[in-house]
Amino acid sequence: MQSELKKAVDAGLALPLMEAFYTIQGEGYHKGSAAFFIRIGGCDVGCHWCDVKESWDANLHPPTYIEEIVAQAKSYADTVVVTGGEPLMWNMNPLTEALQAVGLKTHIETSGAYPLSGKWDWICLSPKKRMLPKTEIYTAADELKVIVYNKDDLQFAEKQALGVADSCKLYLQPEWSRRDMAIPLIVTHVLENPQWMASLQTHKYLKIP
């Protein structure tokens, strides 16, 4: 990487952009609403069931200056979802400030495994057992979304919920490849613990990105 470009990435003025696309949010609280997704490369959390493993190696994704990202985003929607990979591996302050400066709402989907940066209108925290979230993100989270692969994940979800604010929305979402097994577990848990809600990856049913 050229030294000038590396400095820009280190400062958050450029980011390893894997892809950017306009679609319908498929998960959680904002499901069904239009949004422009910005997928940032780089992740070392390493979920074995991750469906975007190609995002893990940031070196595979060209650093893109945030001006270019913002210019594309503002022509599509009023809401931007920053996801990954793990976007908080990078400094999100410049990107979110630039997005908000042109009137866009900023949402993030993160494991919380790295320090929180950026100015966010909505934070979806999706914690992972391998690298637990940093303490400060729990109280900042607007939405807690736990992926359910097996029954043990329900206990993990309850422990994670202890740290979030009372106003935080709680979601249990089946891991896609195990959905036939996980959905009955989630249904039972939500019925017995109605503070939780079920989330599905509706974009996969709709066959959209």
Image (spheres, helix red, strand yellow):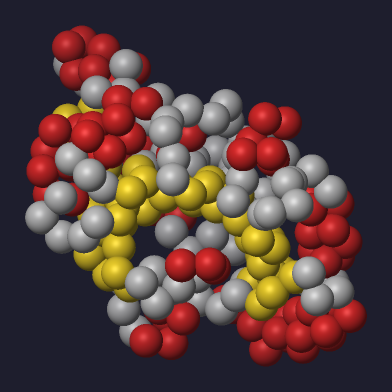
Q: Residue at x 45, y 73 (%)?
A: 31
Residue 138: image location, x then y, percent: 69, 40
Quadrant where the N terminus sits is top left
Relative side of 156 to 133, left or right: right
Residue 32 in view, yes or no: yes
In front of the other: 134 or 56 = 134
Q: Is residue 59 above or below residue 38?
A: above
Q: Closest to the observer: 200 or 149?
A: 200
On-image quarter of the C terminus? bottom left
Q: Is residue 56 visible?
A: no
Left or right: residue 158 versus residue 64 is right
**In the figure, residue 32 lies in which quadrant?**
bottom left
Residue 90 lies, in percent from the top left, at 41, 28
Of 209 and 35, which appears nearest the observer? 35
Quarter of image, res 59: top left
Apparent side of residue 54 relative to residue 13 in the rendered image (left or right): right
User: Which residue occupies 75% across, 70% down?
Assistant: 196
Above or below residue 127? Residue 189 is below
Q: Residue 163: percent from the left, percent from the top?
A: 79, 43
